[in-house]
Amino acid sequence: MERKDQQSPQEETARILVELLEVAINSIVFLKGIYPSGAFERRRYMSAVVHRARHPQLRDYIHSAVTGLRPFIEKGLVDRVAVVFFNSDNVPIERFLFRLMVNQSYRFRVEAADLEFSLRSFLMKLSVSESLTKVLPRGCNWEITAYFRTLPEARTSKEELWVPTDTDQWQQPPLITPIKSMKCESLSVQLYLEHPSVSEPKPQ
Amino acid sequence: MSFDSFQSRSANSNGKSKRSFNSNSSHRTDGSGSGSGSGRKKQQTNQKTLGMAWGANSLSSSRSSTRKSPFTNFGSYMVEKNRKLRDQFEAEASSSSLGDSNSGKSLFHGVSIFVDGLTVPSSQELKVYMLKYGGHFENYFSRHRVTHIICSNLPDSKIKNLRSFSGGLPVVKPTWLLDSVAANRLLSCGTSKGALLAEGGESTKDISQCGGGSVFESGKHVEVEEDPAAAEKYIELKTSEPSSTDMEDENSIGEAHLPSPCRPSASGSSYCLDKASPNSRTDGPSNMCHSTLGDPNFVENYFKNSRLHFIGTWRNRYRKRFPSLPDGEKYRKRHANAPAACQRTSIIHLDMDCFFVSVVIRNHPELRDKPVAVCHSDNPRGTAEISSANYPARDYGVKAGIFVRDAKALCPHLVILPYNFEAYEEVADQFYDILHKHCNKVQAVSCDEAFLDVMDLEDGDPEHLASTIRLEIVETTGCTASAGIAENMLMARLATRTAKPNGQCYIPHDKVYDYLNELPIKALPGIGRVLEEKLKRSHIQTCGQLHMISKESLQKDFGAKTGEMLWNYSRGIDNRMVGVVQETKSIGAEVNWGVRFNDLKDSHHFLVNLCKEVSLRLEGCGLQGRTITLKVRKRRKDAGEPTKYMGCGDCENLSHSMTVPNSTDDVDVLQRISKQLFGSLHIDVKDIRGIGLQVSKLESAESCKQGNEKNSLKSWLLSASAITEEPHNTSSLAKKRADEEIGEQSVDGSSHQLINSTGSSYVHANQSREACLNQVSALPPIYHLDRGVIESLPPEIFSEVNEMYGGKLIDFMETNIDRRSSLSGSMCITSQVEGARNKGKRPLSQNVVHLSSIAAEGTSPETEAGVLGRNISAKLPVPSPETEKANQVRQNTLQEIQSLPVSTPGSSNFNMTTMGADQVDLMPASLSQIDISVLQQLPEELKVDILELLPAHRMPECSSDATLDPPREYCHEKFGKKNIANRLSGSESASENSIWAGNPPKWVGKFKASRCLILNMFSELYYLSGMTGLLSSILQRAFSMSSFSLDASPDVWDEAICSLFELLKQYIELKVESDIEEIYVCFRFLRRFTMKSRFFLQVYDVVLPFLQSSINECYGGYLNISNAE
């Protein structure tokens, strides 16, 4: 609790944001049904019903991925965090994107409760946005991808968790379906979906 | 251990008589339960259990699979025991051979049998054969010693298992043995007809078939009992014999309990209290009665014997007994008057000590200090659950909820008694008589537990009072009670926990913290296993630790309510009031034990009985309900027979419910609906393991009778038609409503319906209803009325309200013209029209007919229209006292005007615009002064009425008439687009200064000043939509007005498009970085508008490229607006 006072607003924001990302990514993976629903357990996060992976490895992957991002989010280096679902040919089918903007010049104390409350809406919206998403074909896989504004220079140990992705990119600009946006003084988060454009050459 | 074996061995060596003495003495030790003997005995019994468990593990026999033992370390024990058993067998064999030496003595030499499961003849008889004919009998299976496995029948799975397990040992039927004896030679087991596996067809054990199978011959019986090891075997057999299989109750599932009628038991330690409870102990009926299959009165018997049912229905009994119970309201008031309450010790919590046991043994003082438990079945091997245990028994670790066999293992001399429901009722009644005698504020928690609020009592010392009450309870009932005294219910309850057994505890205010600090969290009411587990994970074990955590973080982790509860409870805060008895929310009955059906007939029969039960319960409570819920527990696909005999095992729960218009407690209705619900579930009846029927939405039976008429469809229809026929009825009905509460709903419902059907939005219908309800309770002063609500009232309701205020409402509303001229203007018109309506001169529906018929004829020249329009505008202030005829004339002329655009399809674009301009000149003050939103909420016919009174040139905008479209379409397709393109390019420079800046944003003022109606509307909508500054809320508002005109008039078409383009463009620029969700929502709305409106289609088409390029720039993609639908 005392920790909070020593933290910079960015640190606090990043902490909350990373927590949200972890919960939200768990929920997304549940939503997409890539694993059997039995692999998830119902939990409450900020009194919103969410689903969390039961399998320790899966949970760990998500946890370590987003926690690894934390220092970069804090510095405002991360532009987008994508949860990419791709088929067996590594061609993306659907991407969930979190577009983050941490206000680097914000100097005031971050009210954790307020921020959490506004971020909660992402979870609520996510839980009802299944209809916006596409049904995945069999044999799909997924990964978490982060897009950096600039590549971080300092090589920290945590960074090694992140490797360049070998998932194919789309040739055409994708179609965007926004799910939720939130903006406050210290932070702006947007969650949206990307689907391949109609003119995208079909992977054969 | 060593002592045991020594004892047995010495017994064996000393021969028969000694053995029998041994077994007797052990029983005697059990009975007296004295000193070290009991402890030793306990150990021995434990070991017996162990032996059984080993059998279960080593052999997958059906009955042994039901047994689980918590013990693991038994290897050495078994070695010893097997050796002992062999010794005994040999001793026995030698003695029997001495008794009657037989020629065939060595018939079975070298044969060692193991009997698996139930056989005919029984394993004991087989053992005797083996004794006589020189064979061996193994109590436990061993690959090395056993040569033959004897069994009558096996399920397929076991046959497989046994084959692999037995390593190819012959598995034979007992007849093989008998045949061999008869033939006096060892028959080949492979060819004998007794070979089980050769036959192969024998299938799963049929319980009913086995029911009569097992025969004990008394002569052998005695012999068996003399042998401790064999006696044990005998008990085991008893267990497997279906007629003595214990009945288990389904504690975990809740409501339903079925204690079996107890049978005389073979186990020596069981007491028989036939005198005390003559009814509950009857001779065991056949096995068939324990499932729905065999017992036609299953449901009835089930609940007759259910303890939970007793507890559940006890409350109603209590209510009937103490009907004069002051209601909770009164208490609350008094408490409100005494804020000092929190400082004073005022609550006593009384709880009888192990009620279910102590009531049964109150007349048996000799049992008082012995471990006693109550359970419906005393079968020592059973999986019946202990319902309650007294304190001596608890010292052994026996507690409610554990299986009898485990309890027996913990405490071998545990006395298990059946329920005695009559005694419970009697004692509970005495208990409450005493409480009510001493205190008038009693909250019954259960049949043996209550809270007293003694704050107002003269007798100042609650401790003294508590001890008086406790003393009296002991004297009257012969059972003890404990009391907790504290400042609130929570602390009183916790105090009782400390006070138990038979004591009392007082926690003064200043000790609360100390008390709680060390208290394990589990002790707090409301913290169950799950919550405790969660808290433990956060390293919270005691209330003190819980204390450290902030309310916010508790609420975050556990939800708002639970979090607050935890926070409060950890501080000893409890704001509940004594005497607040919860209303019954639902009444039902559920059976999850012994439910097995063969066919649909069985299940229907069961349902019928369940309905009878539920109906009786409803009647008993004097309640009726409207929602009927059927719950069915269905065996999961992969679930086998449950561990618990006749239990429900692993099930999925299905439920279906139906709401009927009239409350009911009628058996026939319940049956009909439950059958319907049952049918809708489409389940194989064989898979059903439990059925529950529940009735909710309860009303008291008397009010139901009155309410039924009002609620019925007939009255609903009547009242609705009454309103449409004569507006006056509405108000008269409303007055009636004020008189009788029950009627409320039907009338409300109908007016509600009316409003909806006339096209006004749901929200407003609700508001009006709210207003109506206000009127019902008491007419508030006129200046208390919320103008916003009144304004948005549909006209019928408005007139009704107006009437209630004696017509003052109109005046009242008119005095506020200054505030919002446009609104009051519209209200004037509305009310005037209302006036006309109320006079009943002409039914509104007629107007519609006129309009349509005249519209077809209209061919008047433009000039005439202008003149007429002026005429009408002059007439506007005085419309109400018109005769029917005048009205009709006016209507005609109006219609002619309205049809103008239709009559000039051929006119050029130029003409159209000039015409529009002319009209604007002719009618300077017109619809723009009317609040569109109010207009929208008017019923269709009224709207037409008002529009008639308004200048004609506005008509196209408010009309969705398709015939109006072609000319405009023509004009705008042709020339509009070019113009707009020009103008758009011109407006680029103007976009420098943001129109979204400021509060309200600049565009609002700009649009308001515009002569384009649609822009005016937008600025109006800005305010109506709550001034959020969000375009989406404005568009949503516009969208919710379903019949709202979304097209601009031709003259201002281009201007409107440019303005909206600018509005949207700047909005996109504003939001694209941070909130594409908002943009997305806006464009989804716009897209929907395009379906209805050419104007918006054009706006959308113009803005879309800009939107997509902005999005692409920012996000590298295109907004998916069209595909999402």
Image (spheres, coloured by chain):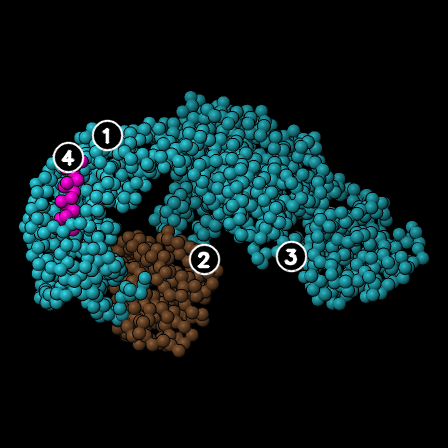
Q: Which of A99 and B920 is in front in this view?
A: B920
The numbered disc on residue B1116 is none
The chain letter corresponding to cyan is B
Disc 1 is attached to a residue of which chain? B
Label 2 amino acid? Answer: Glu
Q: Mark 1 points at which residue?
A: B804
Q: Which of marks 3 and 4 is nearer the N terminus?
A: 3
- In percent of width and height, residue B701 lies at 46, 31
Q: State how far apart marks 2 and 1 are (Cα).
A: 57 Å
Crowdedness near tag 3: few (<14), some (14–19) or many (≥20) residues, C-alpha within 10 Å: few
Q: Nearer the viewer, residue B919 or B713?
A: B919
Label 4, secondary structure: give it: loop
Mark 3 touches mark 2? (CB < 8 Å): no
Crowdedness near tag 1: few (<14), some (14–19) or many (≥20) residues, C-alpha within 10 Å: some
The span shown in magenta is B883-899
Label 3 amino acid? Answer: Thr
Q: State how far apart marks 4 and 1 are (Cα).
A: 24 Å
The numbered disc on residue B72 is 3
Label 1 amino acid? Answer: Met
Q: How many labels does the image show?
A: 4
The chain letter corresponding to brown is A
Which residue lies at the image location 36% right of the left edge and 37% below the top edge? B717
- Same chain check for tags 3 and 2: no
Q: Which of marks 4 and 1 is nearer the N terminus?
A: 1
- Same chain check for tags 2 and 4: no
Q: Nearer the viewer, residue B790 or B982?
A: B982
